[in-house]
Amino acid sequence: MTAPPRHGSVIVIGSSDAVLGLGLLGIDGIEAHDAETARAALTRALDDPSTRLVLVDEMVGAALGDALTSASDAPQAPLVVEIPAGGAGLEAGSLRRRVERVLGLAEEG
């Protein structure tokens, strides 16, 4: 029996806690501690043709600024989603609304 085809990879960009925590789930990660390393990590993830989903913790997202917005709004793969940093709560439904907007299933607003 063969394994199902891989549809692409998921990468997390963030603090060592985010990379370690999601790494325990089998998700590859790139640590970023400042704007320069965050931009380099985002570019690396976006340039990899196998990447389908990039998770960026909110602390790194803040350092990326417009680069994160541009990547998140791009219509082509990969999907870029900001996630809460350690200890932060995720506003109910915000991730779902963002994914629906990116996929064109919801109005922008």
Image (cartoon, rainbow, N blue to C red):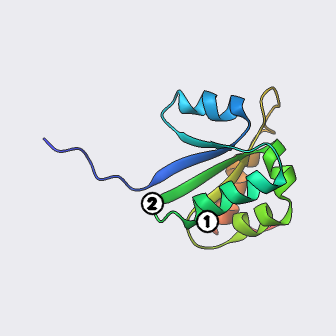
**Residue at the spot 66% in from the left edge and 64% down from the top edge:** 102
**Residue at the spot 56% in from the left edge and 66% down from the top edge:** 47
Task: Using the numbered discs, state the Cα–Cα distance from disc 2 to disc 1 in whole angstroms.
Answer: 19 Å
- In the rendered image, the quadrant that contains the C terminus is bottom right
Question: Residue 88: x and y, percent?
Answer: 83, 31
Three-letter code for the amino acid on which mark 1 is drawn: Leu
Q: Badge 2: how crowded within 10 Å, few (<14), some, or many (20+)?
A: some
Which residue is identified by label 2? Answer: 50
Q: Quadrant of residue 14?
A: top right
- In the rendered image, the quadrant that contains the N terminus is top left
Q: Secondary structure at mark 2?
A: loop
Does any portion of residue 59 appear in the rendered image? yes
Mark 2 vs mark 1: which is more N-terminal?
2
Given residues 41 and 77, the one toward you in this image is 41
Q: Could you say which disc has been placed on residue 103 in the image?
A: 1
Question: Residue 75: x and y, percent?
Answer: 63, 73
Q: Quadrant of residue 64?
A: bottom right
Q: Quadrant of residue 73?
A: bottom right
Three-letter code for the amino acid on which mark 2 is drawn: Ser
As drawn, 76 above or below 27: below
Question: Residue 68: x and y, percent?
Answer: 77, 61
Q: Could you say which disc has been placed on residue 11 in the image?
A: none
As drawn, 104 above or below 65: below
Given residues 55 and 48, the one toward you in this image is 48
**Residue at the spot 72% in from the left edge and 56% down from the top edge:** 98
